[in-house]
Image (spheres, rainbow, N blue to C red):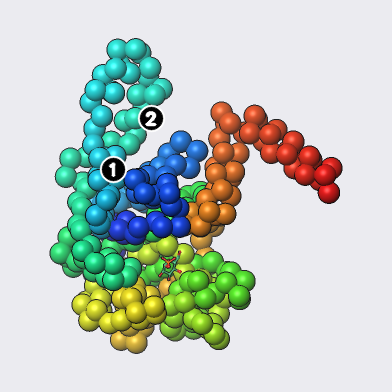
Amino acid sequence: MSRKVTKAIFPVAGLGTRFLPATKSIPKEIMTLVDRPLIQYAIDEARAAGIKEFIFVTSRGKGALEDYFDHAHELESNLKKANKTELLDILRSTNMDSGAIAYIRQHKALGLGHAVWCARRLVGNEPFAVILTDDVIMGEPPCLQQMIEAYQETGGSMVATMEVPSEKTKAYGVLDIAEDMGAIVRARGMVEKPKENPPSNLAVIGRYILAPSVMQNLNKLKQGSGGEIQLTDAIADEIEEGRDVFGLRFRGERFDCGSKAGFLQATVAFGLARDDLKHEFGEYLEDIMSMRKAAE
Ligand code: G1P
């Protein structure tokens, strides 16, 4: 089996109710971190990892997300006429090759596993990546690239993982560890959102490289945690059937942009990482922190 990974699935069908009213009329993936929509961070990370085909699993109300990837001809020619080359470069960096994007509709919200399964015909019999756009990761090299490099060594399937406090494990897929090799762990099992007795505190973060057999496991459409079809269960089935599943403790900082606090933290971190903003923004943050301290 080839270890070349060129296809990535982006499950983007979620309603984003945690961000109402913003998500009343815009998809949550279009929400902006500094000046780029969340989806652009995910796309850039996928491209850096060598992904060539981008499969979006969408739902009703995601039109703005599809439009985002269209070439903005009028805007491009206006910027060109005005000689705004820097803006033109930024705009062009969002362009995608013709035929590189596919949209598949998830007709019912039956869970992450079901969303991934909706893309089965586009993926075919190849290993594929899955990126959850809520998980924004600041890392160098970008997280998916780290995973692709590790996967070249290990084969099998691989999930991104990081340690979380024990009381937070119930919000994640959690790895049961057979062998801890440092950056890479070999899993003996995986549990989605364990209510009690988590097998470890290594949580699955939203980056996956999966063997095509995971799609076959999803064919069973088995209901799991919360009555949903879980991707975690289909990956756990791999282990049951004797195939390898690894976790990679990636290098980088992960932000949960599916939560308001996480989104704000990401805004601060990505703002401070920008040369054009770090000075003014950093001073402002220092000022408000010292005002807060003085008021205490
Ligand atoms: C999903 C997965 C879970 C994973 C998490 C990472 O859960 O089902 O296994 O740990 O993403 O963000 P969700 O946060 O969509 O409920």
Q: Nearer the viewer, residue 164 or 251?
A: 164
Q: What's under tag 2, amino acid-wise?
A: Ile
Farthest residue in the top direction? 82
Q: What's under tag 1, amino acid-wise?
A: Ala
**Badge 1 local density, few (<14 within 10 Å), some, or many (20+)?**
few
Residue under the point 23% across and 26% down: 73
Does ligand 1 reach within 8 Å of label 1's beta carbon?
Answer: no
33 shown above or below 131 = above
Q: Determine which quarter of the picture holds residue 108.
A: bottom left
**Badge 2 local density, few (<14 within 10 Å), some, or many (20+)?**
few
Residue under the point 24% across and 79% down: 221
109 shown above or below 81 = below
The x and y percentages for residue 88 are 35, 24
The x and y percentages for residue 164 are 58, 69
Residue holding disc 1: 64
State which quarter of the image contains the N terminus. bottom left
Q: Determine which quarter of the picture holds residue 151.
A: bottom left
Is residue 187 visible to us here? no
Secondary structure beneath dot 1 equals: helix
